[in-house]
Amino acid sequence: MSCKKTSIGGQALIEGIMMRGPKRTVMAVRKKDGSIDISERSISSFKDKYPVLKLPIIRGVAGFVESMTVGYKAMMDSAEISGYLDEEELQAEKEKAEKKNNSALMAAITIVATVLAVILSIGLFIYLPSLAFKGINYLVGGVLSPLQSLFEGILKIAIFLGYMYAVSLMKDIDRVFRYHGAEHKTIFCYEAGEELTVENVKKQGRFHPRCGTSFMILMLIVSIFVTFVLDAIVPWLKGILWLRTIIKLLLVPIICGIGYELIKVCGKYDNPVTKVIAAPGLWIQRLTVKEPDDSMIEIAIAAMKEVIPENEEEAKW
């Protein structure tokens, strides 16, 4: 039995899984009649079009934007294929999509909704922690000033964990998280060099160092260190909340890029250093990666088999 590290990754969907290999991206979804729909996704990578996006740090930002775009589309398609939306809901969604394409008003509403979502994210993860620290630090006479970066980082992580816990209580999201477990276990099985069968996949671990959840928590941890450096270089920014918020927002791509590089290293190497880096993400995965049932594992195997190249060396790092 061989052991290898693979570049193949996946995403849990509604009653399905998308696997992305070195040459193909395939989505497997369980239909209402119990059969498995397998479809290949045609994806034009940003990094293939613009080689500069393959550079370290930059590739992390490009990869994140691409994965969000591809993942959202796959999630919507899986909802339709699985029958998650009934006929009336599906027709309503299609009509809404047509209106978005044909109506300037709907386009404006979409833009406004996107802007509001961005503002909410900035408020929760950037402005609110700074505001909360300013208020608490004032009440205690400013003694917490040296700990500002740490305080804000811990609060951001707490908000993230609270959100993930809340959504995990939803029945439909819980199923997606169980498919997430099937995805991880199947990748582990392939990396272990074992035959892709339900029994072999079931005995694998479900927490993988190269996971979107780990990426998010690493970004939050990296932001603590980046903010600490920022405060050390320009300490006067601490007193100007709005300007500090803008600067931290501009640093998000750098934080994203560093987080990506760390995840990449953790997925490729297994040593004491990478274990320490991966530990927070692996722990947080207890919220987002649940134990799958056999039918979910079958979906993951079906998707995985489609993306393994004939020359398996191409699937390695």
Image: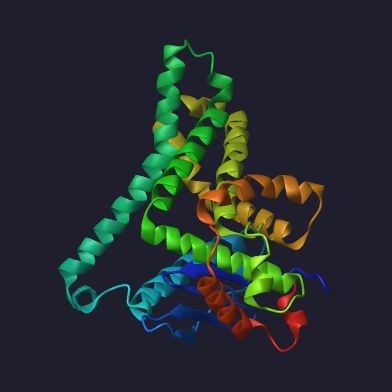
Circle count: 0
In this view, the residue farthest toward the top is 141
Write the residue at 52% across / 25% down: 236
In this view, the residue farthest toward the bottom is 310
Task: Identify the image quadrant of the C terminus.
Answer: bottom right
Residue 303 lies left or right of residue 210; in this view the side is left
- Give coordinates of residue 254: x percent, y percent: 58, 51
Above or below, 23 relative to 258: below
Write the residue at 48% across / 86% down: 39
Above or below, 280 relative to 140: below
- Give coordinates of residue 100: x percent, y percent: 22, 73
In the figure, residue 47 lies in which quadrant?
Answer: bottom right
Color theme of the render: rainbow
Task: Identify the image quadrant of the N terminus.
Answer: bottom right
Above or below, 139 relative to 172: above
- Give coordinates of residue 24: x percent, y percent: 59, 83
In the figure, residue 76 lies in which quadrant?
Answer: bottom left
Q: Nearer the viewer, residue 53 or 274?
A: 274
Write the residue at 79% across / 56% down: 270
Residue 78 in view in this figure:
yes
Residue 6 in view in this figure:
no
Write the residue at 64% across / 67% down: 202
- Give coordinates of residue 52: x percent, y percent: 62, 69
In the figure, residue 55 lies in which quadrant?
Answer: bottom right
Above or below, 65 relative to 48: above
Residue 228 lies left or right of residue 277; in this view the side is left
Q: Nearer the viewer, residue 160 or 292?
A: 292
Q: Nearer the viewer, residue 193 or 109?
A: 193
